[in-house]
Amino acid sequence: MSIRLENYEDIIGESEIENIKSVAEPLRGSSVIHVNSTAFGGGVAEILRRMVPLMNDVGLGAYWRVIKGDQDFFTVTKAMHNGLQGMDVTLSNRDRQVYLRCNKMNAETLDLDADYVVIHDQQPLALIRYYRRKAGSRWIYRCHIDLSTPCRHVWDFVLPFAERYDAAIFTMKRYLKEDLHVRKKVIIPPSIDPLSEKNKPLPDDQILSILGRYDVDPERPIITQVGRFDP
């Protein structure tokens, strides 16, 4: 299905559709590039798969770039992810060089000339160190993870890159970092896409059929964890 803002009218109403268009109008014609580490799997890819076409639908020129990296790079960035969310992690000099080398390589190969460049999470965060920015462009660090109690060693490594950005976006107020000095910090709470397959309501008979297949008694209390357990 081609994603259009009007697809959501039955859910949020016509007035909210018009409000979104009105808010977007001053940005009409602006170019926006989103950068993350994977085109498939993970929450960021799921967000961008819908956000990019919706941005285009309201008049922006939105694009999506995915960085490349080898297994060593993604092993390091996974450790960084865990450290930023509170795990005690030590990055060796080799780990740091793997991370920086991959970001430098991507900065040399990606076209990121846009009015706004949105960098999602820690994997491509250091691109800003190596990319020659378009004059007048604004770079935004979009953090999707919990930074409330990061491992100091890892945070000290990424902080100099994060502070090169013009703005930072977090999902909760308690994730804001006092020692991150950027021009603007914004909160965008988590949300779901009600039109994605996993969020559409299932018919009762299908629910009962699935529960029966796995021997789950629907009359008993159920505890649900939506999302993964992060350290």
Image (cartoon, helix red, strand yellow):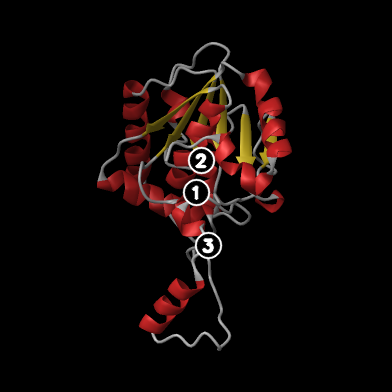
Above or below, 99 against 92 in this view is above
Label 1: which secondary element: helix
The answer to which image quadrant residue 165 occupies is top right
Above or below, 154 against 160 in this view is below
- Name which residue type carries label 2: Val
Q: Count neighbours of disc 2 (C-alpha within 10 A) and say few if under 14, some if 14 to 19, many if 20 or more.
A: some
- Name which residue type carries label 3: Pro
Question: Is the residue under label 1 in contact with that under label 2 (CB below 8 Å)?
Answer: yes
Q: Nearer the viewer, residue 132 or 212?
A: 212
Looking at the image, which residue sits at the far top? 135
Residue 201, numbered label: 3
Q: Nearer the viewer, residue 39 or 101?
A: 39
Label 3: which secondary element: loop
Q: CA distance from mark 3 to mark 1?
A: 41 Å
Residue 154, numbered label: 1
- Name which residue type carries label 1: Val
Q: CA distance from mark 2 to mark 3?
A: 40 Å
Residue occupying image coordinates x 32% and y 40%: 98
